[in-house]
Structures are given as C-alpha cells and as structure tokens.
Image (spheres, rainbow, N blue to C red):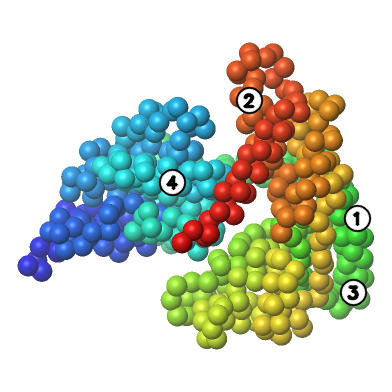
Amino acid sequence: MLSNYKLDSEDEKIINELDNLCGVVQNKEVLRDIIIYIKLKQNNKLDFGNYNIIIRNNSSYNLLNDLLKVCSKVFIKYNIIENERICYLDKIINSRRDCPFDKISGIEDSIIVINEKKLKINYNDELDSLRRIIEQFKDKIFIFEDTNYCEGETDGELGKLAPFRMTIDKISLDDKIMYCTSSFDEHNIKYKKQDIKEYANVPFWILKNMVIKLLIECKSKNLDFVDKQMLKKNKEFYSKNIDRKRNERSNKKHEDKNAKEELNELIGLDEIKKQMEKILNYVKLNKDRGQMPSLHMCFTGNPGTGKTSIARVIGKIFEEENILSGSGDFVEIHGRDLVDKFVGWTAQKVHDTVEKAIGGVLFIDEAYSLVADRRGSFEDEAIATLIKEMEDHRNEICIILAGYTEEMKNLIRFNPGFESRIQFTINFPDYNEEELLEIFNRLCRKEKYKLSKNCKETLINNFTKAKKEENFGNGRYVRNLFEKVKFEQADRIIQTNSKSINSIIKNDIEKAIQTIIFKEKEVRRIGFYE
C-alpha cells in the first residue's frame, strides 16, 4: 500500500524542473507533498477540500508564472485540471453585481491567480463571494499571491481557503549564475565556470538581456565557446547604458522636490514638523562632533495620522543630508512579519529584515503585535533579536516602531530594552476637520475631480461625527470615503448620461456616507445573537 504514495519518475522529472528556475527551488518539497496528497485524496485517505495555494512572492521579477507552469504539469497529469492556462484576476468579481464570475474573461483557464493586495481593496465585500466561487468551481486551482510582506495576516484571512504554502525568493547571485550556465548549456556554448560569477553579478533583468545578446553573437558567428574577454565586452555594453540611466535618475532627483519640501507640504502635523527639524539638527550636530546618536524612534497615535508618510520622508532626509551611509531605502513591514513558525527561524528572519534596511529606515507598523500572551514564545524571540539588532546597528539604520498609543506603551513596558534604545518618541494627534477636508480636496485635485460648492458642509459634518468613533481612521478614513464617493459618482454619471464626468456633487458624498454608516451598523450586530 505504501508504494501507492511514492513518486514515479515522471513526478520527479517535473519537480526537478524547479532546479532550473530562479527563486523557486525551495518549493520542491511542497510540490512533493501536493503529489502525495493527490494520491491520498484519490484513495479517500485525506481531504482538505481543494488544492489551492498561497504563494508569498518576495521577488520583483515575474517568477510566479514559471512556478505555476511547473505546478500545472502535476495537476494535469493527475486530471485535477484540464489545461495549463493561467488567468490573473485583479478583483474577484466586477463591482456591478449583475456580472457573475463565470462571465469574466479567463474563467475557462484552469489556474486562477488572485493578488491578495488587490483583493484587500474590497476584502470585506468579496470574501463571501470568494468562498462561493471556490465551492462552485472545484475544477479550478486558486492561487493567492501575497506581495504584502504580511505573511501572518494573509494566512489568517485566507488560510482556510488554501491548504498549501509556497514562496518565491529574491533572485540571488547563485540563481543568476545558474541562469547563465543553463542558458549556455542549452545552446551548447562552452565556458569557464570561474568566469561566470563576475559576469552574472548584475540585476537579473539586465543579465537576461546580456545573455540573449551573447547567444545571438555566438550563433551568428558559429562560436561554441565564450571566453573571459567576450563576457567582459558583453557586460561593458550594458554597463554603459546602466550608467547613463543612473545619471538620468540623478538629474531627475535634482529636479524633484527635496525631502524637506515634501515634509512641509504634508497636511497639518505642525508640531511633528517642528520636532523633526529639532531631531535633524541634533543628529547633524552630534555627527559633526563624532558622536553619532542612536536614530531609533517610536511613533504613537491612531491610524491614518501620517506616521508612515513621516517615516518615508525621514528616510529621504537622512539620505539627502548624508546622515546614514546607505542608499536611504525604506522598508515597511507589519510587526507579525518578524515572527516565523519554527524554533530558531524567527531570529534569522529579524536579522534578515534588518539587513535589508541597513543604511535606511525600517518601519515596523503595529509593532505591539509582538507582545505575546506567554513568555518564551516566538514573539519574545523576535523582540529579543530586534533589540540586539537595534544596538548592533545603532549608527547604520533608523528603526521606527509604530502603533496605537496605549498598545505601544505596553510594548515598551513589556521589554525595557526598547526604552534604552529608542531615542525619540513622537505622538501623532488626530487631524481636525479642516485638515481632513484638505486631504479630501487634495485627493480630488490629484485625480482632477471638481467638488460642487455645497459639498464642504456635508464633509465637515461627517468628519465631526466620524472623529467621535473609537480608533478613528483619520487620513485612511478620508481615502476610504473618497473611493466610495468616486464609486457613487460614476454610477450617477452613467445612469444620467451626464457630460460632467469630473464633477462630484453633494448627493454623491451623501450616498457614500450612507454606505459607511450601513457597514458600521452591520459590524455592530455581529456577536449579539445567541
């Protein structure tokens, strides 16, 4: 009986195709598990309900398609799906309810890819529809692509809809070397292994162009060997173009607004701006004296109060003022992203995350989520490692912990090591009604909408009422309202055949507000029934 669950040579051949793809080889074991699970399910030994997969995509290159093509071969072999065609959906269903899922172009394809970040735009509305769709189309494989770097959140929200997990890693130098050697081997071009490492040490999208050009040159000249000089000449051709583009970007950066101008143009936050100016003066003076202070900060306040915006500007200021030696990269994560699932893995995950942000800013939103109910948990391991990293790299990185005021106080009390390493604590107040109105007006100007004159009072009254709600969303609330206003405005324009497609009227806003009030009432009813 055990032999029924062994992989055959064709299975192994398919799985080994991952060896020749960048960033996905670590999924071989998952693919083996899927094959064994198929066999178990077919023998009524185990049934998770479907074969759906959550794929955490950490790469900026289009590697997902390559991974799914290999997976589809397994599913086709075992008659799970009919074809290897892949449909990428931006949304689960059309915003108009009269457009059922099976009428959307692409549903005849066997693999349906849903980007979790785009799904979350209408997450509360769409989740029930998504469950029904998966139940209805059991002959499809649904892939949830997670590009949010919030693995814990995605798993919590969609985990019941997909039993399997895969990852796509950033392309490493080893991956790039493998890509070169595989390409040359495939076309019978000989080379010296020691020459490839230096040749391949460029961004992957550039390397692909380099290899294509080199293969064309070899085949057109009947060459079956590339020497070091040919590799160098080929690489230099693209290096010149890279340098030219870098100069163009540098010139563009000078034309753009500098970070201080961006800071001053942020709506409201007057006290925060004054604090930032003092912090910058303090840091610059101490650096000139050879006594570089710690740059770590704690941001507290309600959601949507500008914490992330200020953090991004800080990264740019540190880069422009040469406060930090790195590129000024801004890395944004959720607190749960620092916690891994196995003993010893969390510490490495924290270390790797900090390494990515060296020379710039690491912004940890909802950092209080690292407080666990019990001692000795993975969260404790994350906190202990993070505190050590904050000390080890105190002059190389600015780590900003952010979250609700009381929750952040609890985090600091939970481990006093934070207090000695956080140099600056900044509290972000809620926006007032006029500032919220200006945020709404700026969103309108950005997308070229025009507000009618009688809209201001309606918006101000709504903001006054909304501000009384617990954990009011501030700028986040305004952006959510703006999206709903656009939705109502579009419906009115189409229904009335109006020519004023850029106008927003009072009725559009009132209808949008009603949808928000209705949803709040629906949420409040949950939990009151026995």
| Marks 3 and 1 in Cβ contact (< 8 Å) | no
Residue situated in front as seen by the camera: 213 or 303:
303
Query: Could you give the CA–CA distance between mark 2 and mark 3, rounded to whole angstroms?
Result: 55 Å
Which sits earlier in the primary sequence, circle 3 or circle 1?
A: 1
**How many other residues sit within 10 Å of disc 1, few (<14), some (14-19) or many (≥20)?**
few
Tag shown at residue 286: 3
Quarter where residue 368 is shown: bottom right
Residue drawn at point x = 41 percent, y = 36 percent: 216
Left or right: 11, with 494 as reference point: left
Mark 3 neighbour class, 10 Å CA radius: few under 14, some 14 to 19, many 20 or more: few
Residue 505: image location, x then y, percent: 75, 26
Using the image, tell me which numbered label, if any, was put on residue 270. Answer: 1
Q: CA distance from mark 2 to mark 4?
A: 25 Å
User: How far is the residue under mark 1 from the one under mark 2?
Assistant: 36 Å
Name the amino acid type tagged 4: Asp
Position of 433 with respect to 367 (left or right) is right
Q: Secondary structure at mark 3?
A: helix
Precedes in sequence: disc 2 or disc 4: 4
Measuring from the top left, give residue 509's x and y in whole percent.
72, 33
The amino acid pointed to by label 3 is: Asn
